[in-house]
Image (cartoon, rainbow, N blue to C red):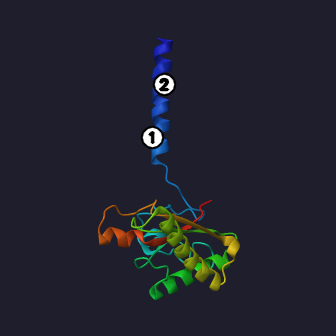
Amino acid sequence: MKVKSALLFSCFAAGVIALAGCSSMSKNKNGAPVTNAVGGEGGAYSQGMGSETDFGTSVRAPANQTYHFDYDRDTVHQEDYASIQAQAKYLVAHPSATVKVEGNTDNRGSREYNIGLGWRRAKAVAALLQQYGVSSKQIITISYGAEKPVAVGDNEDAYAKNRRVDLVYKSY
């Protein structure tokens, strides 16, 4: 009988602990519930930049960003300059932050050519970041060539999506 009672109590205690773990809600340092950053309205992932108070400064928090390129070109589009400058402002204000600048290409051309083209694209974006005051120590430049496509297919839409540079912030 004692074994049955102990087993029943153990099952009840395990159930209470499991339910308590499921119902807990994360809270930030102000005691407010933490929302899902990916699905939250106006969050860093949905708008490209976070709120001005995310890091306690007037410089907005960064989000990973993608810049597209024309076929066989490594010239940054003029309309991307403002976004790159906004990324640079954050990096200048946060000298311990680092960003990886990843150059990518579509799958046309040889592997060697695409690695070189991806490198030139990444260096073009990195050069703009430095021109806006970012230290070279904060920038990691890499080329993946055609090795990391975001779109699959041998059509112009897929090619255009894969001709890009991704800014990827290091997460700690």
The image shows residue 124, relative to residue 37, as above or below, that is: below
Mark 2: which secondary structure? helix
Residue tagged 1: 19
Residue 9, disc: 2
Residue 139, given in percent of the width and then of the height, sits at 64, 71
Residue at 52% x, 66% y: name it. Answer: 115
Q: Is residue 44 left or right of residue 133?
A: left
Residue found farthest to the top: 1
Which residue is pictured at 49% across the width and 49% down the height?
A: 24
State how many labels appear.
Answer: 2
Question: Label 2: how many residues lie within 10 Å, few (<14), some (14-19) or many (20+)?
Answer: few
Place of residue 136 in the rendered image (x, y in percent of width and height, measured from the top left): 68, 75
Would you say residue 95 is visible in this rendering?
no
The amino acid beneath tag 2 is Phe
Helix, strand or loop at label 1? It is helix
Q: Amino acid at mark 1?
A: Leu
CB atoms of marks 2 and 1 within 8 Å: no
